[in-house]
Image (cartoon, grey):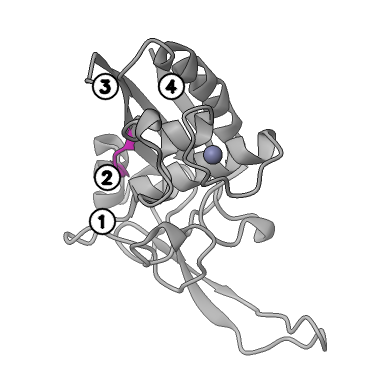
Amino acid sequence: MKLEGKLLINGKIKALTGLHIGGATTDAAIGDIDNCVIKTSEGVPFIPGSSLKGKLRSLLEKKEGLNLCRCGRASCNICVIFGSGADKRTVEAGPTRLLVRDCHLTEETKNKMENNEGEFKELELIYTEIKWENVIDRLTSAAQHPRQMERVPRGAEFDFQMVFNLMEKQDVDRFEYFMRGLSLLEDDYLGGSGSRGYGLFSSRIYR
Ligand SMILES: [Zn+2]
């Protein structure tokens, strides 16, 4: 198998509510609850490509009625596109087709935040807001100590870019399958605390 071509998918993700993606650097970042949001070495929040990729994979798995598929077979769209553990991956499946780059704040959002403009006028920190929240004990229903949660504010926009490698003829169909899955991303949750109304976002894709 050799690389026949690359398809680039560019788009934007807009946070419709405050967005919290915890500071872990592994695939487990989704659903992690941490007080701080993950940031670049310059201190600017971003969405790790691995988080977005993991989210897309789980949405597609859910749609197919699968539970964490890692079969590694060439007949499995999910494993061919998203990858599987190196030990499971069959030679026929070839290399992982999808690469998801880290999503950074758009220049426009970043500039507005740095200049305290518009909807970003009252941020507690340069790029983020700090909210207090009460943690409720599920057993006793008693409120625990309130804690602080850092979030990327509502309205923030991120650029995203994905690369889909075409290695063989069937990859054209796999790409179409993947693009249908991409629409599942709209109005879904990213990051921890989805159940508390954080992390709702919309995505737009430019073709
Ligand atoms: Zn599989």
Numbered disc 4: secondary structure = strand
Please report the residue visible at 43 percent of the width from the left and 38 percent of the height from the top. Answer: 82
Tell me: is circle 1 under 8 Å from ligand 1.
no
First along the sequence among labels 2 and 4: 2
Tags 2 and 3 touching, CB below 8 Å: no
Please report the residue visible at 47 percent of the width from the left and 40 percent of the height from the top. Answer: 72
First along the sequence among labels 1 and 3: 3
Which residue, given by chain and number where applicable, does mark 4 sit on? Answer: 205
Q: From this view, report whether residue 27 is shown above or below residue 7.
A: below
Q: Quadrant of the C terminus?
A: top left
Q: Nearer the viewer, mark 2 or mark 4?
A: 4
First along the sequence among labels 4 and 1: 1
Q: From this view, report whether residue 101 is shown above or below residue 33.
A: above
Which residue, given by chain and number where applicable, does mark 3 sit on? Answer: 1
Residue 102 located within the stretch drawn in magenta: yes
- Camera-side residue of 198 and 75: 75
First along the sequence among labels 2 and 1: 1
Tags 1 and 3 touching, CB below 8 Å: no
Q: Nearer the viewer, mark 3 or mark 4?
A: 3
Numbered disc 3: secondary structure = loop
Place residue 101 in its image quadrant: top left
Q: Is residue 127 left or right of residue 135?
A: left
Numbered disc 1: secondary structure = loop
Residue 114 located within the stretch drawn in magenta: no
Tags 2 and 1 touching, CB below 8 Å: yes
Please report the residue visible at 62 percent of the width from the left and 56 percent of the height from the top. Answer: 194
What is the x, y in percent for residue 21? 44, 59
Which residue, given by chain and number where applicable, does mark 1 sit on? Answer: 44
First along the sequence among labels 3 and 4: 3
Residue 110: mark in rendering: 2
